[in-house]
Amino acid sequence: MLILTRRPGERVVIGEEILVTVMGVSGHTVRLGIAAPQGIPIYREEIWLAVMEENRAAAAAHADALPAEPPAPEQTSPQAVSPEPSGESAQEQPTDPPAAH
């Protein structure tokens, strides 16, 4: 394992395409910025381990334990918007999730 000391604003280059920048340090927390090609997945370790465990569990599942058909999509009813205390109606905000890359 390579161990480096970097200050905020300093960078580390991995290979020819990955750039890691120390964005800030606060107590025991370090903020990193990672620039990499879009096709390279970047995960926090705890997320990576959870994904790997889910993959292992899915690979070990017996075929007869799986449902015969996928579940039907859930039907949702439109929600009413309650008026604001000032008497004006609330404006709806977009609910689309942010795009992942």
Image (tube, rainbow, N blue to C red):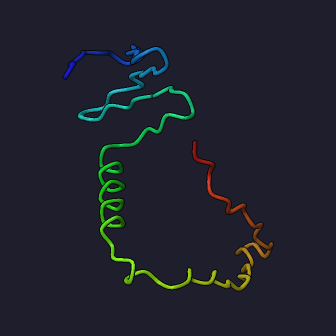
User: In the shown orientation, is residue 44 left or right of residue 85?
Assistant: left
> Image quadrant for the N terminus?
top left
The number of numbered discs placed on residues in the rendered structure image is: 0
42 up-or-down from 33: above or below: below
The residue sitting at the right extreme is 88
Q: Nearer the viewer, residue 68 or 94?
A: 68
Q: Nearer the viewer, residue 50 or 85?
A: 50
The x and y percentages for residue 30 are: 32, 31
User: In the shown orientation, is residue 90 left or right of residue 58?
Assistant: right
**Residue appearing at x 67%, y 85% in the figure:** 75
Say which quarter of the image contains residue 8.
top left
**Residue appearing at x 37%, y 15% in the figure:** 12
The residue sitting at the front extreme is 63
**Residue appearing at x 39%, y 13% in the figure:** 10
57 up-or-down from 48: above or below: below
> Image quadrant for the C terminus?
top right
Q: Nearer the viewer, residue 22 or 82?
A: 22
Say which quarter of the image contains residue 29.
top left
**Residue appearing at x 62%, y 84% in the figure:** 72
Say which quarter of the image contains residue 20.
top left
97 up-or-down from 74: above or below: above
The x and y percentages for residue 21 are: 42, 21
The x and y percentages for residue 90 are: 75, 70
Q: Nearer the viewer, residue 68 or 52?
A: 68
The x and y percentages for residue 54 are: 34, 62
